[in-house]
Image (tube, helix red, strand yellow):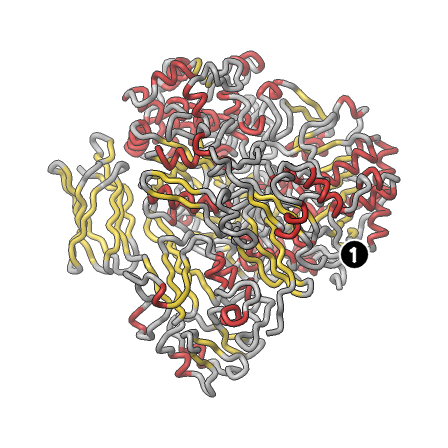
Amino acid sequence: MGIKVDKSVVRPIACGGTGGDPVVVDSAEGKLVRIRPLRWDMNYTQEELAGTLWEFESRGKTLKCPVKAMPPYYAFAYKKKTYSKDRVKYPLKRVDWEPGGDPAKINAHNRGKSGYKRISWDEAIDILESEIRRCLEAYGPAGLLGIGYDGHKESKGIHYGSGAQDQIMRLIAGSYVREVRTPDSVEGFYWGGKHVWGTGAWDGLGMPENYANTMKDVSDHTEFLVLQAGDLETTQNYSSQFQSYMMKFWLDLGIDMVTIDPFGSYTCMIHDEISWVPIIPNTDAAFDFALIYVWLTEDLYDKEYVDTHTIHFDKMVDYVMGKTDGIPKTPEWAAEITGVPEWTIKAVARKWGTSRTSMGHFCGAHIRGPYSHEPGRTEYYKLAMQGIGKPGVHMIHLFSWTVAEPIVPSLGGFLSFMFMGHADSNDGPGPMSIPRTAIHHAIMDGEYEWWGSPSIINSKPEDQFVKRTYPNENSGGNEFHFIWSEKASNQASWNGGFYLQEAYRNPKVECFVSNHQWMQCDTIFADLILPITTCLEEQDCYGCSQGGSLHMYGIQDKACDVVGESKSDYEVAAELAKRFGKYEEYTKGLTVEQEIESSYLSSLIQNMISFEDLKEKQYFPTPFNPDWQNIPPAMAEFARDPEKNPLQTPSGKIQFWSPELAEHFPDDKEREPMAKWNIGGSKEDGYTHDESLWGEKAKTYPLVLNTSPGRWRVHVQNDDICWLREIPTCKTIIDGYAYEPVWICPEEAAKRGIADGDLVKVFNNEGVVLGAARVSERVLPNSVKMDKGAHPDPIGPRIDRGGCTNLISPPDPIAKHCEGFVVTGYLVEVAKVTEAEWEQWKKDYPEHFERTEKYDVASGSSIDGWVEGGLE
Amino acid sequence: MKTFLIDLKKCVGCYACQIGCKDEHCGNCWKPYAEEQPETGQFWMKVNEYERGHRPHVKVAYIPTPCQHCAEAPCMDAAKDGAVYRRADGLVIIDPAKAKGQKAIVNACPYGVVYWNDVLDIPQKCTGCAHLIDEGDTITVPRCFDNCVHGAITWGDEEELDLEGAERLCPEYGTAPRVWYKNLPKKFIAGRVHDPVAKEVVIGATVTATGEAGTFTATTNWIGDFWLRNLPDADWTVTIEKDGKKVAIETSTKIEDKGLGEIALA
């Protein structure tokens, strides 16, 4: 046979950026051949792995750590991603943009529309250098915005983009405006839950602070598992498929399960044993209050625990029983709101109230909608009433899923990040930080104010009581005019995407540079595009720590040759450093190889394996703590003795009503000191959102859009992998274009004359996104389901063919005092696209149709559509 | 004889088998076993997916379907010049050189797992990754099997596999496949039962489906759900009874699974 594999590189390919179960990348003569799951025993004997491959017994059954790693399935398709048709191989400059800040030569209005031409690396770095110098001189450090943090969402160490960008910007400018990631995965917990039970995991996420041994404890004790918050078969894939393995064990043990979700989730659909309770999107708080009503009236909660572990329970009781507003929150009341029959609500309440119950949490839609702080809080109310921390009673979160606690200390699951060498991520708020959710407002209004640290972690509840402004007091009143992004997904992953597109087209933005591997999302709005290597093309050190079967440290050689003229973010920053005389300082005088060794020497495994052995074996799965089964599970210590093991709330206890919120925001009717059923209202009446079925807006837009991460993507990553796009629930091809599915129930489809496979538009005041109708029983009336994260493909202003839902999500935050995103649970209408409409678009926006003619249907957007004369 | 055993109870519908097949064969030419698989459009391992039932009793079936490597393979009969041959280990292979122009090989397959390559003018299908089995330099098993981290796909010598209770896909084709399945989906009837007066779910009601195909029973669970599973394709009278209350529903599983939705037991 012609192909002989000459190199096999072990590494994680996880588009969550956090490692993930590793793969083996086979290549021949510098070209990728195959990507397959690693067997942990590939380079270690069974004896060597004896203290690493955990196993435990529960209810008479044994669960063993799988010997074969369980990588996310898109990792197996990463060859296609590496050699994707929209891969940026050379530096590109937008054809109608010139550096220098001359408004006449920027043509800002053509961003997202005009094409590109290939330039040399010399010219590209010249432009980058000169634009930074020019903007620094004109506007000072406040004139520069760095968009980063995510390293293109690839799992990297030395070459981690955000760290490279941040370090060189600090070296050049001293300070700059840093866009900081908001608590996007956990909005409802962050803005709501933290006021109930404190700072939470990783100093800020608002989820349980402790989560060791959760899986063992659930296996031993849990009788009922409620999946009210997301779809593990979808969400786990940012790192691993291990949770499917765990779920099967729990089903084998006979744990009853229910999915309470607007969508017939992939998890629920594959297991006969899981019951489904369909619920109208973003009505979970009402559902929860009705459960609590049943528990209160039928004595189905842990009174002793509530007495000893919580404060202000009585205030919630008064609200639920209707003493404060005259409305008892009965199952009958909730049935009207949620679409769940009252007998079903009672049945769930009784099952929950009479069983040791845990909640499986997978960053679901219910804590990412308008006013997500309410379901974020009611979730904790429920757990508190059932004695969270007692045996079998937990909130099981994605990040908590380490089965056997490793002997190497894990810092909030970020074990592998300690091994990142060069790239430290500056995600904490700096002197001029701005939240990611505020970029469009900052550009369009020239000013913005918000409460709270913009940071996703290392942020305490009291940070939310601090008011911040843009431009910042350190900025000399200057706005930013230069954007350098190593993270192309803002318009597709965050809210108000169409508004952000408009902001990018604002002439205030004089220069927009994008480091990226692929021609997608924000990159097609940039003026200068720098081609970046994928993780497979880099020599690096990285591990995996979250969501998988084991933790691992690793050292990786390049798995294949560099594609085109790509450089890593580290190398780009190094080139720039040379121009500013900062090269030695930036590289610390080390080569990449030396830096890897230096990372090893500062790691926690240096006494466990030699550097030479690690290099040879490529990976080191960390042994478990021999005593792991005796570590108290999750919140057990708090449950056992709350006085000695207090939470990080001012009272040390679970607070049903927050004295701090009452003190700082006494007039806030959107986030009161205690969660309430809150449907918002008009702007005139002082509300941020009117996105419920019971307001004015619903008269025009009567469907609640339910979005969640797509199963065949990780947020916006991998929407261009043709092998994934062939999967029926990924795309539907209509007339030579692959559209995003719009899941609609037969009843709502019939009302609109929509048939399965029709080209439809999903729209509201923000604009129009197109998709292909998928008529399905997995969706319920009054709602429509569309996965978020499809790559935008602009037809014209506020018209998107790619089906990117976040373009039409509300630009405004969760609530006045909660600077997070709303990316689901908002109102839309759906209609068939008419022939007249289509013809009009073709007439008005010919450049879109000319560009898409050059696309590859199988892969979507391709470089050929964007670069004059192609690349080769 | 090399045999696949696919247990659908273990499958989570992740498509890693389908993707792994493409990763192995797209852009990689493994002659003389196979030419490259086109980038898209062919599925030498195809996951067939379909939605079953009605809200809220909905499930999705995933059936990974490779070439069935039939012991009595119609494609071999349709091929000329020995273009399709069976190896000693049972794998059925299309010789890409000899099969040029032979579209009849595609049409002969009742399972629809042979694809036509217009550009190369050849029929193509699963080879069982014979190139890996014979000469694999890093793995020596079929890629779909290696990629299945859930253990739904197993592969090996027939006598080593636990085939008890396994079935073949569409046995009526009579081609004696060497791909076996466990837990192939059979029809279900499901419903959620409540008492409209008490406004409570009904737990422990006896549900009986009767028809010419037999009698099947189930009991409603904590949420009032019943699931009558593994039903033959037939017409049914479903009766639901508890405490003297009874309701009867006529339905059929001849075409599809049935989710009967909310049922009032009055």
Q: Residue furthest bottom?
A: B81
Residue in front for this viewpoint, A390 or B89: B89
Q: Where residue A192 appears, x then y in whole percent? A: 51, 24
Locate residue A330 relative to residue A730 in the image: left or right: left
Q: Residue at x 80, y 44 (%)?
A: A574
Report x, y in % for residue A405.
Answer: 50, 35
Residue at x 40% of width, y 37% of height: A227
Label 1 residue SS: strand
Q: Visible in this render: residue A771?
A: no
Q: Is residue A83 visible?
A: yes
Residue sitting nearer the eye, A3 or A319: A3
A191 vs A254: above or below = above
Q: Which image quarter holds the C terminus of chain A?
A: bottom right
Residue type (three-letter) at the residue carrying disc 1: Lys
Residue A526 lies, with reference to residue A368, above or below; the image says below
Residue B259 in percent (x, y) is at: 29, 48
**On the picture, is A787 further left or further right than A111?**
left
Going by the image, does A662 lie left or right of A333? Answer: right
Instruction: Give percent across and percent down for residue B248.
Output: 17, 47
Can you say which quadrant of the picture contains the N terminus of chain A?
bottom right
Question: Would residue A531 be found to the left or right of residue B84 on screen?
Answer: right
Residue at x 62% of width, y 68% of height: A4
Per the image, the residue denoted by label 1 is: A117
Crowding around mark 1 (Cα neighbors within 10 Å: few <14, some 14 to 19, many 20+) is some
Indicate whether A856 appears above or below A205.
below
> Exactly how many numbered labels are in the figure?
1
Q: Of residues B144 and A195, which is closer to you in this image?
A: B144
Q: Chain of mark 1?
A: A
